[in-house]
Amino acid sequence: FDVIGSLTLLIVFSPVMLAIALRIKFHDGDTVLFAQTRVGRNARTFSCLKFRTMVPNAEELLAALHAAAGYSGGLFKMEDDPRITSPGRTLRKYSLDELPQLINVLRGEMSLVGPRPNLVHEVAQYEKHMTRRLRVRPGMTGLWQVSGRANLSWEEAIRLDLYYVDNWSMLQDINILIKTFRVITAGSGAY
């Protein structure tokens, strides 16, 4: 399902992906893709691919943003993150920045549906029960993405991911994929 689905979607979206790549390149002349180390199934790390939506030095600016926002752990999202570029705002709103993850799915590092892959430092903060998220491949979309996206708290996102892991079914995956299309086209809850 993942291999055929990701290959089909890569072919269908290739013109869109080319247009996005050109838009990013023409915006500031820097790299088009952003690869970040994430934790996948059985705690194996991999390079999660995305279209770059932030300024080239975004990682260097992160510590100052953490301090200003009072970040203490979990998933870090800012509604008006100053590091996001103008093309990046649109890409994030409609989750187009995540299209390169179809390559991760094709390589077997991710699935179309599953818990989002967390950063290494986020996984290091897991309580014991949270490690159940690592029993399955992380997904491009999942239960918490269709249940509120960035509007959910870290605890709510983890709870939904654990529910997904404990109650997986192909029918649920298909339902989540259908809901994902609706959530993405609405563009709500993403930043």
Image: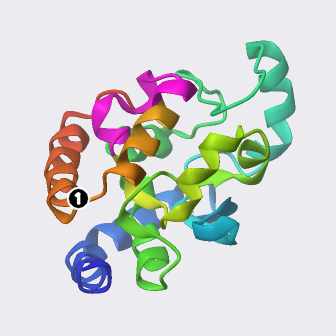
Work out whether residue 174 or residue 77 is closer to the camera in this orientation and state it. Answer: 174
Judge whether residue 145 is colored magenta: yes
Picture residue at 46% right of the left edge, 68% below the top: 101
Work out whether residue 188 or residue 171 is closer to the camera in this orientation and state it. Answer: 171
Residue 191 seen in render = no
Please say if 180 is above or below 38.
above
The residue pinned by badge 1 equals: 173
Please say if 16 is above or below 27.
below
Question: Of the residues shown, which amino acid type is indicated by label 1?
Answer: Asp
Magenta segment boundaries in residue numbering: 143-156
Question: SS class of the residue under badge 1?
Answer: helix
Picture residue at 23% right of the left edge, 47% below the top: 180
Estimate the x, y position of residue 71 in percent, counting from the top left.
76, 20
* Relative horizontal placement of residue 64, taking residue 154 as reference (left or right): right
Picture residue at 31% right of the left edge, 51% below the top: 167
* Relative horizontal placement of residue 10, taking residue 86 as reference (left or right): left
- The quadrant of the picture occupied by the N terminus is bottom left
* Relative horizontal placement of residue 190, taking residue 128 as reference (left or right): left
Please say if 173 is above or below 88.
below
Residue 137 seen in render = yes
Name the dominant secondary structure of the magenta segment: helix
Estimate the x, y position of residue 51 in percent, counting from the top left.
51, 60
Estimate the x, y position of residue 166 in percent, counting from the top left.
39, 50
* Relative horizontal placement of residue 152, taking residue 53 as reference (left or right): left
Work out whether residue 137 or residue 36 is closer to the camera in this orientation and state it. Answer: 137
Picture residue at 40% right of the left edge, 47% below the top: 91
Please say if 7 is above or below 134.
below
Work out whether residue 172 or residue 4 is closer to the camera in this orientation and state it. Answer: 172
Estimate the x, y position of residue 142 in percent, counting from the top left.
35, 49
